[in-house]
Image (cartoon, coloured by chain):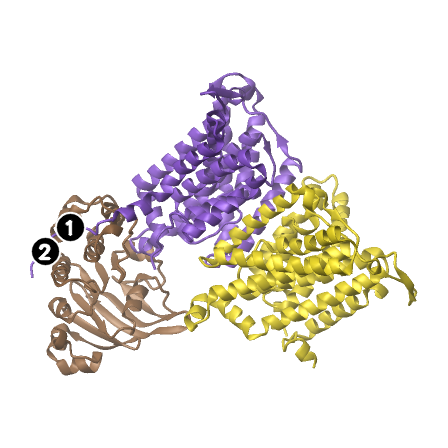
Chain colours: A yellow, B brown, C purple
Amino acid sequence: MLTAILSGDTPRSRILTVLLLAVLVCLAAAPFLFPGVRALETAATICIFIVLVASYDLLLGYTGIVSFAHTMFFGLGAYGVALASTHLGRSWGALLVGTASGAVAAAVLALLIGLFSLRVRAIFFAMITLAVASAVAVLVSQLFEITGGEDGLTYQIPRALTPAFRFGELFGVNLNGRIINYYLVFAASLVLFLLLLRIVNSPFGRVLQAIRENDFRAEAIGYRVVWYRTAATCLSAAVAALAGSLYAIWLRYVGPDTTLSFEIMLDILLMVVIGGMGTMYGAVLGAVIFVLAQNYLQSLMGVAAGAAEGLPVLPLLLDPNRWLMWLGILFILSVYFFPTGIVGRLRSGR
Amino acid sequence: MSDDVLRIEGLHTDIAQYHILEGVDLSVPRGAVTMLLGRNGVGKTTTLRTIMGHWAAKSGSITYDGQDITAWPTPARARAGIGFVPEDMGIFTDLTVEENMVLAAASGPLDATRLETVFAAFPPLRTFWKSEAGNLSGGQKQMLSIARAMAEERKLYLIDEPTKGLAPAIVSTMAGALRELKRAGASILLVEQNFAVAKALGDHAAVMDDGRIVWTGAMAELAADAGLQERLMGLSMEVTG
Amino acid sequence: MTAAPDHAPTMTRLSAADRLAKAAPFLLVPVLILAGFLAIGTTSSWLTLTVSGLAMGMMIFVMASGLTLVFGLMDVINFGHGAFVSLGAFVGISVLLALPGWTAEPSLALNLAAVLLAIACAMVLTGLSGWAFERVIVRPVYGAHLKQILVTVGGLIVIEQLIHVIWGPDEIFLNRPETLQGAVTFAGAALEKYRILAVVFGLAIFLAMRLILRRTKIGLIVRAGVQNGQMVESLGYRLRLVFIGVFVAGSALAGLGGVMWGLYQEVITAGMGERMMILVFIVVIIGGLGSVEGAFIGALLVGLMQNYIAFLEPKLALISNIGLMTAILMWRPQGMMPVVKAK
């Protein structure tokens, strides 16, 4: 039964199983285990990033193509919800319309990009997605009448999802709409993750992996490589957009920095690589570790920089704003020495 | 057999997960033409490419001119005097005929007397000296590929099917050029499907099957024995010859 | 059998259509300039826009040339190339800022000397960084595109952040040297002096590059290597060394492009290279990976298109280059002048 839910793709490592269960339990009971606004923010962010990273892994890890447009698709979903909520008013219907149109738009755009670039060379894809994503990011900040520009959009969502909606107390925790909202995010993320797990373990997913290993051979056996790659791109884009919609529902705000920035794209890359490319579970560990580190380690760097004050160069390198540099170094080292990521290590070390 | 310019022992080569060469033993005597024969897909081209260093040998050794070159990179093998003419001719089609020849003289400027020899053997190359090599006809490209190998002194030539798909008149031009090379003292390892050419040029012959050498001997002996040809290569070459 | 062949030498004749297909990319630039004239209407604005488009194109070409050759030669795709643009800009501009006496004087000779010195310093430093980058970042991942993209992106971030560490987190504003400021008037159009200089300079670099690629042996090796590296090695050339040379030269050119771009914009940021890379990639793709001439034409098209559209329909300028790329890929999926790869 459990194996069926996991599509037969069990963790295959005792430590990994324990870690995944711990993550599941913590996220499922987050409002009660870790009371406090910041903790709940962190938990919701983790849920959403797990889906976002897993959908990216479908592309990078399972299909072997690099995209720099994943945040664009993420943003499409987020802006879909934001725009629908702004124009259709506060309603469940607006959320639904926004989510659906965001996902469809993402899939269509992915189809177009895929048809253009994957037809020729997989390597074109990386470059073209980078170009398109940056053009879209600039476009979003330019078309401020529609998108709110750099400031982004703030909008209303159904009252039942907001802190203003209170309905009692449980285990000493005040129950409010925010908790309902969290469980919406959690449940949707869980379903999407299991869906992705199903996809990669389906015959379709196995063809993708065959293409990743040797696209000439896959083509020779008779699979239309371009078709499979494009389909994977569309699926991945649609799921990323759904994750974006969840993020928009959770934050009640969208802006270029929270959804479209290149920095988030790098975060996603890092999460996939650290967790383990081509192993859906890697997305879980990668996202958890990364989001926690981002939220709490940056303050630590500030402390370290303060401690190193007076020393040459070191304070500059430890400045919390140089967080990205350490990520870059970590990223390079992971690709060299740790290409299978944490999950790969755990599975082989069993 | 100290007078072998090339000696291969127990050579194994894998390409991806396929075992192509499964223990090739082969000697190429100095100053002679050795034919490498066999059906399609038995590993002739892979043998040449492994000698040239395009594929790494999984095991076995390649001794060239008394030195073990098994682990050498391709350019070092070329500089040591091995010339290579691949089956696809390896012409730089975006470059002119002249530029192709200039490149072929790796150790210095193109030698004028050598060039005259080349032009004598392949007159069209003089005509199209300044033209893009991509615009040459198939035969002319093949001439250029041999001419490139002649641009410099080489001790050993590895030549892969130089007459494939060529008109008879050009085939005889090719054969003449190869004979000229041999007369100049070079050793040649030649893969050839045209048995008439093989018979006319070859001193020695080695026949491959399934990634191994299955017969070696004098070319004349093989040419004279139709039964042997039938057994080794699955067809009597006298029919085509 | 004698050596003398008795067949008449013939050559496969190129049909008129083939010739046109070959020349078509070269014709695109004048066609675009003409179309720009028709769409803009006034000669003076058109002239101003054309010069600034060409200037922009030349600078993008300088940045793109190394990238396309590096890819052509060794199938290496360097997403960190933009880091050298930023690095070059910071080094070059720092040199200029350190020479206020040379740049503030209204002396063309002194100003140009300062700029050339800045360029030299920038190129030496970015060339050296390119060499280190190739050794440390790129070499371990030969033949693996996926890892190449990932680690070179990592390298880009690290270099960008190091620029922040060395030069601080803020953008640096600068003034062009005295005599390169302002504009000259020609046929009623105001043409910025610096843009004219950039066009001349870029063109000179393109011609020099062409000369090296066509007339020197190293150039022949590079051109042949882009087409069939294995055969070049079979002739006895160590392509790896040539590749490292091209990588270093390409990085130095990116640095040069960075200095030129910095002087053009009169502001530099650590992220400028990353942003330029987007245009550079478009140029490399539409030119045909591995083709220097293709990159040149592509760069001019991108520069001109961007300037014309920005004048005609500012909102569309951002996506005009994406549109250009789409159109060209529909016409030629491999880019305008793809290198015919052997194998």
Residue type pointed to by label 1 = Pro
**Dividing the image into 4 quarters, which one contains the N terminus of chain C?**
bottom left
- Give the residue number, with chain letter if any, for mark 1: B124
Side of C210 relative to B83 (left or right): right
Vertically, is C127 above or below A272? Answer: above
> In which quadrant of the rendered view does residue B51 lie?
bottom left
User: Is the residue marked by circle 1 packed among few (<14), some (14-19), or many (20+) residues within 10 Å?
Assistant: many
Q: Where residue A1 sits in the image (x, y, percent)?
A: 70, 82
Query: Is residue B89 visible to us here?
Result: yes
Secondary element at image label 2: loop
Residue C124 image position (x, y, % from top left)? 48, 36
Do residues under tags 1 and 2 come within 8 Å of each other at their CB atoms?
yes
**Residue A339 in view, yes or no:** no
Picture layout, residue B59 above or below residue A339: below
Cα distance, mark 1 to mark 2? 9 Å
Quadrant occupied by the C terminus of chain C: bottom left
Pick the residue in front: B183 or B30. B183
In this view, the residue in front, B91 or C322, is: C322
Percent x, y of residue B161 = 22, 65
Q: Amino acid at mark 2?
A: Pro
Residue B32 shown left or right of residue A34 in the figure: left
Q: In percent of the image, x 37 and y 43: which residue is there?
A: C25
- Number of numbered callouts drawn: 2
User: Disc 2 marks which residue?
Assistant: C5
**Residue farthest left in this picture:** C2
- Chain hosting mark 1: B
Secondary structure at numbered mark 1: helix
